[in-house]
Image (spheres, grey):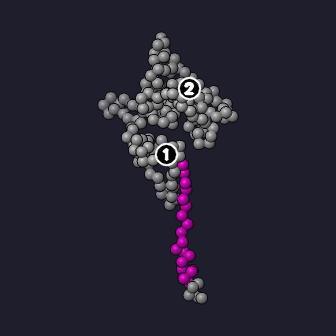
Amino acid sequence: MWRTLLIFCLAIPACNTQRVEYHKRPAWHYAMDKEMPDEVVQEDGTIVKYATVGSSKSAAVSQYLDGIELRSKDEITGEVTLRAILPEHVLEQILICLRDRDWDLLYDQVLSTATRENYESKERGQEEFKAFFEKYRKELGKTVQRLLRGKSFGDVTQKTVGDYTIVTFAPGSLGNFKFHTVKLVREGEFLKLAVIE
């Protein structure tokens, strides 16, 4: 009996508690950074494991997204090219442009061809575009952030009608937002911003 108790006492210090955290990561994050690990060990020894949400991360989807560079910059001219496959990509691009007040990038790379042509048909169209985004910058930012985060909570709906994808607040989730809907249009294989209402 003493022998069993001694072995038991010696075995107790060898037991370690290991902390594991589980986090969800939208599938489109993998397209933004192709080297995102599914498991990370933090400095304190905590293991963080990521699960993909929002869409399937099947081999075919991963392979397709791996082949798309969502943001590229020409080393000679410095020109930035943005591409969006998923609605989340466009919403992220809008947020970055709002944050940086980069109205030229928003106008040239995120805006749909038809919407840009509509502005260009006006005498001061591009100035009107910039003035709108500058004036409503904070309200637009609040709406786009909520549309990005609200989908996983059921506060946001998304539907496709022809070439258009409409991302909007679900009934009862409108809150005090000035803008409620972002309409995107497919141009070839990529999505572009058509209108924010």
Within-10-Å neighbours for mark 2: few <14, some 14–19, many 20+ = some
Q: Name the residue furthest front.
A: 162
Q: Position of residue 33 (x, y in %)?
A: 43, 43
**Residue ID for mark 2:** 196
Q: Which residues are magenta?
A: 6-25
Q: Can residue 141 be spotted in the picture? A: no
Q: Position of residue 128 (x, y in %)?
A: 51, 17
The answer to which of 178 and 138 lies nearer the viewer is 178
190 vs 140, left or right, is: left
How many labels were placed on the picture? 2
Label 2: element kind: strand
C-alpha distance separating marks 2 and 1? 28 Å
Residue in view at x 44 percent, y 43 percent: 61
Residue in view at x 57 percent, y 23 percent: 135
**Residue ID for mark 1:** 56
Residue 15 colored in magenta in the image: yes
83 vs 49, left or right, is: left
Residue in view at x 57 percent, y 85 percent: 4
Quarter the C terminus occupies: top right
187 vs 135, left or right, is: left
